[in-house]
Image (cartoon, rainbow, N blue to C red):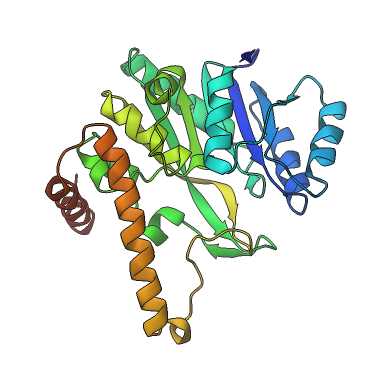
Amino acid sequence: MKVSCNSSIAILMATYNGERYLREQMDSLLVQTCDDWHLFVHDDGSQDDTINIVTEYKEKHPDKITILTYPSQGGACKNFLSMLERVDAPYYMFCDQDDVWLPEKTALSLQEMKVREQEQPEAGIIICTDLTVVAEDLKVVNRSMWEYLSNYPEYIRTFRDAGASAIVTGCAMLFNRKAKEACLPYSSVVMMHDCWVCLCCLSQQGRLYGIPQQTIYYRQHGDNSLGVGVGAAQIGIVYRLRHFIELFNYNAAYYRMLSALGYGSVIKYLAAKLRYRRRIKRGYY
């Protein structure tokens, strides 16, 4: 099943048991200052009222929302990539079900994309913005996710740099068709859809550009985890051990993606991480 998007931007939303926050996200899309988008939703087998909410919005806005119907994919990563395979559009954005987009998000990203495509008309290009981390009630936890995680797109310019981090958060991305083509078909080693798109694009001489402006309230709640808000009292031996294991498993999975794309040795991977941290500390690329 292939679907053509009649707008410039195909916004892809993967849903699963998202009834609690879904209306806020849908409402934030409908007040975007840029209207040149169409929302495609695929549900991954929700047991709550998610699909009824999406259907309600589709009935009110049939020209802006399409529900894709095909089997469940078994997780957010495959769900997002399955939509990317099926939808044809000039540009793409991933959309989580529980965030809130600020009104200028699509307009700001698309404006930057047009500038960068004029500079490099044949390249796969990814534009990403900063995010504001918020609690369930949208109370600000951290104004800048980039600052909190010490992740800055300006230091990830090439595939060699990407050993340090594929720092693009999926819901903060806008990417063009050439970036999409670089990442499909996707490999069995994919750990997350956003990392994969970024790494594949860079591996084929694509470019990543960041906009240092927060355009999303990135909601953290009981059903997801960013690692924010851990108090000192919780950082005991068990926590440290669990964190080390999680960090090791993450790096192993991340390196498997790099390796599948021909990145090189583990030594090169570790050297990229050290070089990245040194650049940030010294404040230059």
Expressed as whole percent of the image width and height from the top left, the position of residue 260 reads 28, 34
Residue 103 placement, left or right of 279:
right
Residue 25, given in percent of the width and then of the height, sits at: 70, 44
Q: Quarter of the image containing the C terminus?
A: top left
The residue closer to the viewer here, 106 or 39, is 39
Residue name at image x 50 percent, y 59 percent: 143
* Residue at point 65%, 12% (across, down): 6
Residue 267 placement, left or right of 195: left
Residue 182 drawn above or below residue 52: above
At which x and y percent is residue 98? 66, 50
Say which quarter of the image contains residue 261: top left
- Work out whether residue 91 or residue 31 is closer to the camera in this orientation and state it: 91
Q: Tell me what residue is drawn at x 60 percent, y 42 percent.
A: 74
Where 282 falls versus 205 (above or below)? below
Q: In which quarter of the image is residue 14?
A: top right
Q: In this view, does 107 lie above or below 242?
A: above
Q: At x 76% / y 40%, what residue is drawn?
A: 27
Task: Classify residue 200 by image quadrant.
Answer: top left
Number of marks: 0
Q: Where is residue 112 in the image (x, y as percent from the top left)?
A: 44, 27
Viewport quadrant of the N terminus: top right
